[in-house]
Image: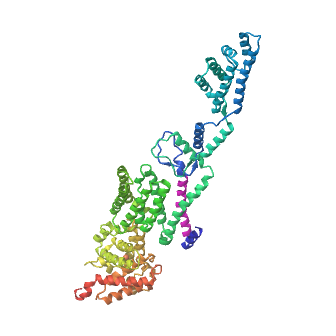
Amino acid sequence: MLKVLKTFFNGMGTGKRIGRATTVFLLFFVPLFIFAVTQSQFSQANLKIGQKAPEDIRAPFALEDTDAYESQVEESLANMEAVYRISPTVQITTKAKVSGYLDLVRDIKLRNNLTVSSRIDELETVSPLDLSSDVHGIAIESTFSSLNTVEAISEDILTQMLAQGIKEDELGYRLMEIDGIVSSLNLQEGEQLLISSILMGAMEPNEFVDTIATERQMELIRESIRPVVIEQNELIVEKGETISSEQMRIIRLAELGEEGSRSWTRYIGIWIQLMLPLLAMILYIKYFSPEILNGRLIYLMFTLFMITFLLGKAMETVSPYLIPSAFNSIIATLLVGPGLAIISNLVLVYMLYFLWSIPGELAIIMIVGNSAGIILLLHQNQRHRVLLNGIYMGAISFIFYLGYYFLGDITTRNILINGGAIIIGGLVSGVVSLGTLPLWESVFKVLTPLKLMELTDPNQPLLRRLFAEAPGTYHHSLIVGSLSEAAASSIGANPLLAKAGAYYHDIGKLKRPSYFKENQFGIENPHDQMEPIQSTEIIISHWEDGMKLGKETKLPREIMDIIDQHHGNTLMSYFYHKASKDGETLPEDKFRYGGQKPKSKEATIVMLADSVEAAVRSIRNMDETAIELMVGRIIKGKIEDGQLDHSPITTKEINTVKNTFISVLKGIYHERIEYPEKS
Ligand SMILES: [Fe+2]
Ligand SMILES: [Fe+2]
């Protein structure tokens, strides 16, 4: 990239151009970069819960939502069953209680010296099981064989029930199962009661939470949940949607993220994505339109681009389809040229897409519609066409949008709302372009073909005055105009400028028309009664008067230059020699025009055409050779007098101009040449 920039700047030539290219690049790049960096924040800074989102809010970069992750983990853990484990020791201790109790019963039964009630009392005192006196009584009165049965069955049931595991909170209802089991067995009533009571007294929960296994399980669950990531550009809140507290949390998260290490990589991303399109535009300028770097056009292009870009932002809040992007294309085509207008439109649409997030299909529509409009604008020379062109651009874009509709990509409602907005956007572009075109022309001092066309319109006040007050000069100016237009066109100069310059070159003659030969129809030549020096002053003053009048009527600078330079500092040789005859040899400078020598090809052409026209008109015996000789002589005279010393015109071009003059003049004086006797 550095190499490209280096070749670019080297190719620019002068230091001034390098400075200008750098300035322009910074003018484009810096504001766009700032927009890109701040755009995700400034819109979010004032957002509140419950407010309607003023635009689509998207994640400025990929961010990890740790809160959402934690709440997912918590939810999963809350639903998770703890891991239980059966403790083998409970079975041993409960069995020991049962057999211990029955052993006590047997012992007490074997003691002969006791009454039944004191046996029961004794048993109650030492029993490991908390049973009622009635149960103790039944136990004491049972036979040994019955006690053996009770012990065996109790242990069986105990083993079975504990094998299934009994949790603490299950103990209550598991105990209720016991009666059912016992009553289903074929036992005596006393035995049944005794078994039930012993089991209920001895039974304990044996299944407990395994903390280590449970923690491992929790760890596995935590690992199985994926981090919650919001992708870059992912929609957080849709435009118009009411912002919920959850959405606000993510918006805040995105802002907090700015401070992290991600932000500088994001800047690199923005930098690359802005840099390359702008670089492409600059390279285009270097290779195809380097001349625009010399003047104000580059600033015009930048200003126009930025205004449209900001208009885009203003409109986008209503509907992106309303953005008058065609405005940039129309003005750029008319003032800068179609090639650069197309490139500028491409970059503008890209920036609208990249920075203001307009829909992708709209970006394509803008490229197609505006490019078509730029081509339609070529060779347009009437001002009202600008407005029409905006409408055409809207219409072409709308038709293109219809394509999406027929493809089934958009709804009928969208085609009505967005399609309508596209047409309005085109119309607004046309109106704004038409309304601001004179402003662009005057602020940036650009002489557009449109303006030149207007200047050559015969209804222009100055031309109407010439026609009415100095008809000879008017006629002369028209012929000089035709000669200049053809000559400029033959050497690739600006024919419209040459023609317009020719139309106005002699407006200074309006002050005293009758002092100029071409306006003296049937009147006496006032110079006959005047001193040569007075005549000279009057004639030379048409140059200064022209400059004054041009300034008063605000003629463009390029036209003023042609008025200024059309005589250079030519000597009024007729009056000079007339004066010299009368007296001594006079200093020449009083008989010379004080204008500048022509500095442009167009001014050079007008100067030559002016002299050639006057000279050829005065030929008495008009024929082709006479025209050729006269044209050659006049041009040679101007060169020898040094009038073309400051002109960029080449010798080869002068030759082409000469041949063009000759062929145009032959056409004009066709009849006089064919039938010399008629003249
Ligand atoms: Fe003149
Ligand atoms: Fe003239």
Q: Which residue is most to the left?
A: 678
Query: Looking at the rendering, in which quadrant would you find the C terminus?
Result: bottom left
Q: Is residue 374 visible?
A: yes
Give residue 576's position: percent from left, percent from top.
40, 83
Quarter of image, res 187: top right
**Residue positioned 49% across, 39% down in the render:** 50
Is the magenta region chiefly helix, strand or loop?
A: helix
Vertical comparison of 440 with 601: above or below: above
Q: Which residue is most to the front?
A: 145
Residue 18 sits inside the magenta stretch: yes
Quarter of image, res 207: top right
Q: Which residue is nearer to you in this view: 679 or 581?
A: 679
Vertical comparison of 50 with 559: above or below: above
Give residue 665's position: percent from left, percent from top.
31, 83
Look at the image and give the residue range highlighted in magenta.
Answer: 16-37
Quarter of image, res 85: top right
Q: Which residue is most to the bottom?
A: 625
